[in-house]
Image (cartoon, helix red, strand yellow):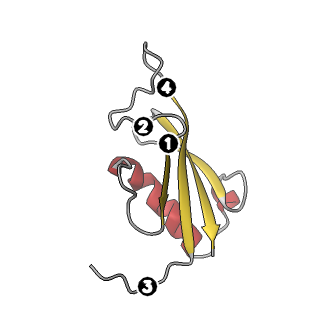
Amino acid sequence: MKKFIRENVSFVITVVDGKKNNEGYIDCRNGHEIGDTYVCEYGCPTDFCQKCMLKAFPIMEAVRAGGDLKNLGGETENMIRFCCPDGVVIFQLEAKRK
């Protein structure tokens, strides 16, 4: 595969919280743990839950279009938290504009 578009934003997605099971681990089918960090520009990061990408991708597209994440409930212009579709894992998405 040959990538020909130079992206102007990269993203850091970090697991910040989640519903824990009896053993103290996040009860995540994909195995996400607090502190796990994923970096990407356009595609789905390696080992990142594809189901969670369904929620992350529209947020990433808003940033790519010049949007301010505060308008979507974010903490800052470039940072927002969101929950996975299963309601188990809380992620923080941070946009790094180049």
Other-residue count near label 1 (Cα within 10 Å), few / some / many at <14 / 14–19 / ≥20: few
Q: Are marks 1 and 3 in contact (CB under 8 Å)?
A: no
Give the mark, 3 or 2, whose residue is nearer the N terminus.
3
State the quadrant of the N terminus.
bottom left
Q: CA distance from mark 2 to mark 1?
A: 7 Å
Q: Determine which of the numbered discs, if any, sits on residue 15 in the image.
A: none
The residue identified by callout 3 is 5
| Amino acid type at image mark 3 | Ile
* SS class, disc 4: loop
Q: Are marks 2 and 1 in contact (CB under 8 Å)?
A: yes
Residue at x 40% of width, y 26% of height: 27
Give the mark, 4 or 3, whose residue is nearer the N terminus.
3
The residue identified by callout 2 is 32
Residue at x 53% of width, y 61% of height: 59
User: Is 41 located above or below residue 17 in the figure?
Assistant: below
| Amino acid type at image mark 1 | Asp
57 or 94: nearer the viewer: 94
| Amino acid type at image mark 2 | His
Observer-side mark, 1 or 3, equals: 1
State the quadrant of the C terminus.
bottom right
Location of residue 28 in the rendering, given as x and y in whole percent from the top left corner = 38, 32
Q: Determine which of the numbered discs, if any, sits on residue 19 in the image.
A: 4
| Amino acid type at image mark 4 | Lys
Other-residue count near label 3 (Cα within 10 Å), few / some / many at <14 / 14–19 / ≥20: few
Answer with left or right where residue 77 lies relative to residue 39. right
Location of residue 40 in the rendering, given as x and y in whole percent from the top left corner = 47, 63
Give the mark, 1 or 4, whose residue is nearer the N terminus.
4
Answer with left or right where residue 19 lies relative to residue 66. left
Q: CA distance from mark 4 to mark 3?
A: 38 Å
